[in-house]
Image: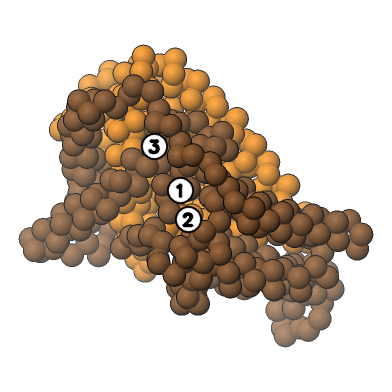
Amino acid sequence: MIAEAVVTKSASASLLGRWESRLKVPGLLLVVFCFAFVRDLSLLPLLLPAAALIYAVSGLPLKHLTARMRLPGFFLLAMALILPFWSGQTVLWQLGPLALRQEGLLSLLLIVVKFFAILTVVIALFGTTSLPKLTVALRSLGIPWLITDLLLFTYRYLYQLASDLRRMRTAARLRGFAGNSLFALKPLAYIAGTMLVRSHEQSERVFQAMILRGYGNGSLPLPPFRPLPADYLLLAASIFLSALLILLQFII
Amino acid sequence: MHIPDGIISASAAIGGYAATGGLTWLSLRRIKKQYDNARNEIPRAALLTAAFFVASLIHIPLPPVSVHLVLSGLIGIMLGWFSFPAILVGLLLQAVMFQHGGLTTLGINACLMGIPALLAYYIFRLRILFGREKPFPNGLFAFTASFAAIALGATMAAFLLVYATPAYFDAAAERQAVIALSLAHLPVALIEGVFTAMVVLFLLKVKPTLLDGDRP
């Protein structure tokens, strides 16, 4: 039900995996924002190879990529069914009331290529950065501790709650609950309510235990920041790629 | 109601991040004013964030399809000003773990869920005027809050999809598209409203303190 955000051995040994997260996160974020900035169709042939190169140095298997593309792909399918037929004036081909329009097709092409390019880089980024490392990077980017603490705690509780929910639903099924009509709304609401009450009571116990262990007395220091020349080189490469995309955007 | 990467223009994505930054700052300020030690509230907020995350995996049968819960109304009701950072964290985790929802659009999506959650929080607080412990105002305002949250979120998303995508619709078609996309969410908003009212009535019986997200 919930995929674990773990970094595999091959991914953490790869070039991207060894890149200091405090430079990798801002570097790759810059790249995806510049991908999002592209409005010109003639720049599209540059996006896919760039994204493929970044994915290639992540050490992640291709299956990892395709498995994660499936779910957002449905949204893209919906756009593919709407845009070419409703957007624009230039009719390319007509069949009864259906007209294939040029502007719609071109904007669909732009959306699809940008979508795949951005998602590929994002998957490479999160596939090679563990959550604790991501938190450190976010802290050094100036994200308040309240947000990063919330992030770590939420992640910590996710799996437990997911298994709680699974247990409750199994119990409900054993009692003959099918949950396939609108009448299932009330039992489902009670299951959700029970989960909230249970997790709240548990959070109070956890909090007491944490205070006993010294939580709340200032935030923990971040691990030392000792980047290698290669870390800066990778950052320079991503800044170069981003600058190139923006420059070409203005020249073309 | 998530807007994925690559669909909307970069300026809209950056605008979304700016708005999220401002709202997060405002929320943190309100939180620090409301609680003596905001750190004490983190375990509770995190557990509820995780619970909402997991509960949104529950699919409600709406024959012939099934819809999954958004829960932005319930998050607002139970977490108050904590709901905006909680939603931001939930969406970030979703982007990290499933690459679902988008990273460049994280700011936009946080606003699409977070602003309705804050609206729901204030609507639900109106129940105090009619009696905090009475079931009827609790149920009514929970329904209204959640319905309004979904309706607002869907309308905002529809506006963005129509006006901030690189598409060339004519003005009349754009208006129609916004109306159609918002109306398509009407059944979802109704179900979500009824569901939230049921959860609130359940909590009122079992653990009413959970509904006072606004009181430390």
Mark 3 and mark 2 on one chain: yes
Label 2: chain letter: A
The residue shown at (52%, 59%) is A18
Q: Amino acid at mark 1?
A: Lys
> Chain A's colour?
brown
Residue A145 locus on image (x, y percent):
45, 31
Report helix, strand or loop for mark 2: loop
Q: Which residue is mark 3?
A: A150
Foreground: B131 or A112? Answer: A112
Q: Tag 2 or tag 3, which sits nearer the N-term?
A: 2
Q: Are marks 3 and 2 in contact (CB under 8 Å)?
A: no
Foreground: A178 or A68? Answer: A68
Q: Disc number at residue A129?
A: 2
Q: Disc number at residue A133?
A: 1
Report helix, strand or loop for mark 3: helix
Q: Tag 3 or tag 1, which sits nearer the N-term?
A: 1
Q: Are marks 1 and 2 in contact (CB under 8 Å)?
A: yes
The residue shown at (50%, 20%) is B29
Compared with A61, A148 (above or below) is: above
Residue A176 locus on image (x, y percent):
10, 64
> Chain B's colour?
orange
- How many callouts does the rendering have? 3
Give the Cα separation between the discs numbered 3 and 2.
18 Å
Horizontal arrangement in the rendering, residue A87 relative to residue A178 (left or right): right
Give the Cα separation between the discs numbered 1 and 3.
15 Å
Q: Residue furthest right?
A: A251
Label 3: chain letter: A
Q: Amino acid at mark 2?
A: Thr
Horizontal arrangement in the rendering, residue B44 relative to residue A56 (left or right): left
Residue A151 locus on image (x, y percent):
40, 41
